[in-house]
Amino acid sequence: LSVDNPSDAMLSDTALNNDLAKAQKIKCHQNNIFRIAVDVMSTLEKSLICRPEDASYAMFLKVCAGLQSGNRDSDYNQIVRDTFMSCCASGFVSKLVYNYFIDASDETTRNSILDNTTPLLTTKSNVDLKVMPPNWSRNVHSDML
């Protein structure tokens, strides 16, 4: 940019404003998709006809991880935590669910669930789900563990 040419500065300001507007639009779009995913998962969990299983939980956590990276507020963390705990209670924690939970959660959320009794499970590297409470995976096919 040249100080001698004020139109360059105006073009730069316009481009910056356009970029900010695009970023805000993307963030709004991501928040809408996240809310839709939350609504779908909530509906599945309440349904008497079609209950979520490991693939449902995994895909929901994948959406959370992908859409909310960098925008993880307390509501987001609580939703991820509640969803994973629901998955645990339902017995559908597979490697896929677990790995997406790690991607979607922050360290505080992971530690609140996994605490010091399962320190090897706080990262995705070489996950051995056999060290988890057995009831977390009681409904998962053995080839998914």
Image: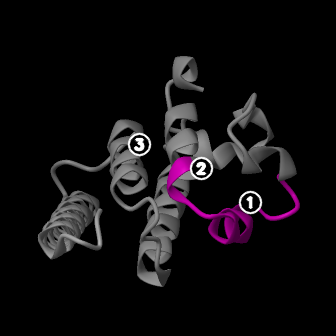
Which quadrant of the rendered structure holds the C terminus? top right
Span shown in magenta: 103-118
Q: Secondary structure at mark 3?
A: helix
Q: Sequence order check: which comes first, mark 2 or mark 1?
A: 2
Q: Is residue 109 magenta?
A: yes
How crowded pointer 3 is (Cα within 10 Å; few <14, some 14-19, many 20+) is rated as many
Where is mark 2, residue-wise? 102
Q: Is residue 88 magenta?
A: no
How crowded pointer 2 is (Cα within 10 Å; few <14, some 14-19, many 20+) is rated as many
Q: Across the whole image, how many numbered discs are drawn on residues?
A: 3
Mark 2 or mark 1, which is nearer to you?
2
Which residue is at 70% across, 71% downward? 112
At label 2, which amino acid type do we have?
Ile
Separation of residues labelled 2 and 1 (CA atoms): 11 Å
Which quadrant of the rendered structure holds the N terminus? bottom left
The percent coordinates of residue 130 (x first, y second) are: 75, 34
The percent coordinates of residue 73 (x first, y second) are: 46, 79
Separation of residues labelled 1 and 3 (CA atoms): 18 Å
Q: Quadrant of residue 13?
A: bottom left
Where is mark 3, residue-wise? 58
At label 1, which amino acid type do we have?
Leu
Which residue is at 57% across, 40% downward? 99
Where is mark 1, residue-wise? 114
Q: Is residue 57 left or right of residue 2?
A: right
Q: Sequence order check: which comes first, mark 1 or mark 3?
A: 3
